[in-house]
Amino acid sequence: MLRRLVILTMCAGFMSACGSDDTEEPLVIVSGNNATNNATNNASNNATNNTTNNQTSNNATNNGLQPFDRPDLVTLADEDIVTADNGVSQEISFTVPENTQSVVVTIVGASPGSYTVRSWTNGDGTPLVNLGWLATDQGAPSLCLGCPQRVTSAESAMAGMVPTNPDVSVKPGTHAVTFYSYRQTSLVGNRTPLAGPARVIVTAKVAPAVPESGVLDLNLWFSGAQGLTAETAPTDVNFQQMLKDVGIVYGKVGLKLGRITYNDIEGDFDIIENAIVPGNAMKDLFAQSANAPQDAVNVFFVEDLLTGRAGQQGFGILLGVSGGIPGPVGLMGTERSGVVLALKRSPMAPTPLFKVMAHEVGHFLGLYHTTEQNAFGGPAVNDQLADTPENDATYLMHNTGNGEILSPSQGTTMRLNPWVRQEAN
Amino acid sequence: MKALQTLLVIALMAVAVPAVAQSADDLARMDGALKAIDTTPTREALDAGFADPPAVLKAAVAQTERTTYERQRALTMLSMYPTDETLAFWRTLLNDNDVEIRGLAVYSAARTFGQTPTPALISFIETALQDRDPVVKKWALRGLRWVKAPRATELLGHYASQADPALAKVAKTALRRIE
């Protein structure tokens, strides 16, 4: 499926910048621009980062197309599926081994299709995602509010993760999942089922216990906005301070930033005018992650970010967007593979950039807003976590993004996400 | 006579004060939506929450004590109410002191009304392109991408070949992105 994604000019030719295993500083890998790639020579993308810092035994990229290869991750399924005329896929079943702490199902289709998990049965036969929620749930099709495990939907690619709240856990045994594909026909939720092919990757994180700590690797991508590039960002004092501040926020829940690569975005992406619903610019931007030098969460820095569609359906200006809650796991290069941040807007906003970055990456790792904005008289939509207060702006995942607090449950969710690795891996 | 005038003023205040109070309440309730970093409410949500959403949004834009981002959020959310009044309001923002507000006003107008452009819209954009500040020009050029009129392509072509490399780059990108 992903072979249809455009393979763009790649960054290659890596050089070490700094870092050692015993430092608190993030390891830095600067990715150059001095090589090109195409669909026929993407084996070059398997190059191990030839850095001197090494921890790099597993930081070879996977061409974006192959499931991750990491000791603590198990690919439980990698299947091509088809959704029928009613939008429903065949059932995928997979066996979850003992000591599995989290499972993520990722479905990758193609725009304009939107995808969600229609049903998910745990290893003990209990429902994680209720069959029928798409017809009955108040949040359908965007968000299953009533499911034991909340899931979202997204255009082109989406992921569902278990658990993202402490009331559910992964049970070993046979799991069964079905998906639903549809085309959004208006901004207010009208939809028609969509038939078509998609690819499903199921990734399990196996460990003796829920990890108490973890390391998050990042690929940072620069459009040149505000003068930041792969060359300038590693030594830009303000930018490096921003990364340190992200690390401080995450450090409070046992998460630290690990290997960081710096990459230039190919092409002109100073403004993304259609975030949320991927248009050409958005999907082309995220698709560049297929050429990333390591399997890591991709963070794209552009100048301005807007959401909405053409015409008179309205749009709005934003500070950041995540590719999903959580974002796709197990593959790079999907139209949802990363988060985008607006560099220019942040100084003009009440929320500083480090909080926006921490917030959006938090979404990508599976965190919901603690409270969705409900000032308009509708019911509050809170996350499923008991330890996040309602509508408390001191929390990082409040929708204003201006807090710094992460709750213990939020920390657990982040550390359980397969994007977060153990220090030794 | 003076007593009558006083009575009239008091009567008007009696009418006006609740309206002002309501407006303050509305602005406070809108605050979270304006500060939100990654979501934008739908028109349905706005209509359900406010008697006159465009009036609240315009009032928020006028609050210069707000951050530029919050004012821009309010400004762009008006795109959900594509009326002549909205276009006229955006046009008044060309007099705003904040270049980002001036710029996003013209971009919003172009993006919202560009499918069926009127001479008034083209005039609005051309006026913005005369702004002293390149930030405003940049937003105007970005907006031209959405305007389905030969004049839009003509203007973009002009700027794409002009000396200012930053504006030329924006114009070339906008030309590529014309749908």
Image (cartoon, coloured by chain):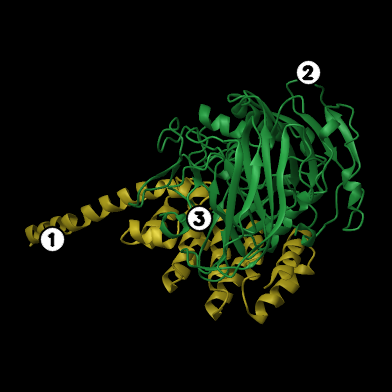
Chain colours: A green, B yellow
Q: Residue at x 72, y 42 (%)?
A: A75
Same subunit, labels 2 and 1: the answer reads: no
Query: First in sequence: mark 3 or mark 2?
Result: 2
The spot of residue A3 in percent (x, y) is: 80, 59
The quarter of the picture where the N terminus of chain B appears is bottom left
Q: Tell me the tag on residue B8.
A: 1
Q: SS for tag 1?
A: helix
**Which residue in the protein does label 2 denote?**
A22
Chain letter behind tag 2: A
Tag 3 and tag 2, C-beta contact below 8 Å? no
For this view, does A343 lie left or right of residue B31?
Answer: right
Chain letter behind tag 3: A
Residue A70, above or below B127? above
Point out the frontmost of discs 3 and 2. Answer: 3
Q: CA distance from mark 1 to mark 3?
A: 53 Å
Quarter-of-image position of residue A347: top right
Q: Crowdedness of circle 2 by 10 Å Cα count: few (<14), some, many (20+)?
A: few
**Which residue in the protein does label 3 denote?**
A142
Q: Nearer the viewer, residue A381 or A206?
A: A206
For this view, does A344 lie left or right of residue B90?
Answer: right
For this view, does A17 lie left or right of residue A416?
Answer: right
Q: CA distance from mark 3 to mark 2?
A: 43 Å
